[in-house]
Image (tube, helix red, strand yellow):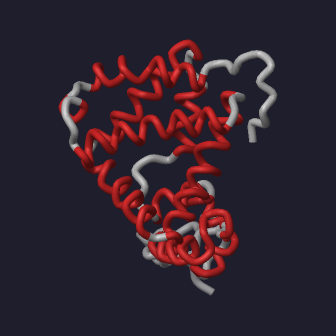
Amino acid sequence: MTGPAAGESVARRSPGRPAGRTDTREQILAAAREMFADKGFDGASLRGIARAAGVDPALVHHYFGGKEGVFVEAMRFPVNPAELLPRILSGDPDRIGETLARVFIGVWDDPDKRAPILAMLRSAMTNERAAGLVREFVSSALLERATAIRGVSRLRVQAAVGQLIGVMIVRHVVRMEPIASASTDELVELLAPTLQRYLGDEPAGDDRPTA
């Protein structure tokens, strides 16, 4: 047995990474899109996606980190709540309403990020399967995560999200003035107090379940 010729290098395989598969990442995303469409966000699993793509589950985790990461890229969602929410909700609790409003408005005001969000919302409004997929993703990746970090009820988190989505639809879909042309600072000043009330500490004696 002879070794590699002079000048040649031996390629080392990382754990879970197949050799010579430059299209592996796209195979995983294609399998994920089909599985999310068929089983929904809750019904899909990393192991099932890996099996459908013909790869080791470790490779899916290597590329995307987890199911939320796969969903974000497969569905071309512009932000990953798993990465964004901890930074927002773990900041200064007295300014969480302002921080959330500024980040949320910034995402929607970016045309490249707004387009896939609007496409997903339009699909959800006309297709029950798409609506269920969005509902499961928002519930698992957004509401439950925010509830765990802030310790407030899902009702309050959902109200905050609904407030923001409603204003952004008026701004970017209906394009109603003066919200359509208001500056980011104007909208943050308008929305922050309400969001702070939703996401600040819950009143004493509020014993509603938080999950």
Q: Which of 96/87 is in front?
A: 96
The structure residue drawn at horizontal position 44% and vertical position 74%, both measured from the top left corner, is 22
The structure residue drawn at horizontal position 43% and vertical position 55%, both measured from the top left corner, is 77
The structure residue drawn at horizontal position 60% and vertical position 49%, both measured from the top left corner, is 141
The structure residue drawn at horizontal position 66% and vertical position 73%, both measured from the top left corner, is 56
Q: Residue furthest bottom?
A: 1
Is residue 62 left or right of 188 when viewed as pictured?
Answer: right
Q: Say if 25 sits above or below 114 in the image.
A: below
Q: Which of 28/113 is in front?
A: 113
Q: Say if 127 sits above or below 156 in the image.
A: below
Q: Say if 102 sits above or below 18 in the image.
A: above
Q: Say if 111 sits above or below 64 in the image.
A: above
Indicate the position of residue 211 as horizontal and vertical percent values: 75, 42
| Quarter of the view holding residue 103 | top left
Indicate the position of residue 28 as horizontal and vertical percent values: 53, 73
Indicate the position of residue 139 as horizontal and vertical percent values: 62, 50
Residue 4 at least partly seen: no
Callout count: 0
| Quarter of the view holding residue 143 | top right
Q: Residue furthest top?
A: 94
Q: Which of 33/198 is in front?
A: 198
Indicate the position of residue 153 as horizontal and vertical percent values: 69, 33
Q: Which of 94/74 is in front?
A: 94
Residue 163 at least partly seen: yes
Is residue 172 left or right of 161 when viewed as pictured?
Answer: left
| Quarter of the view holding residue 1 | bottom right
Is residue 15 left or right of 185 when viewed as pictured?
Answer: right
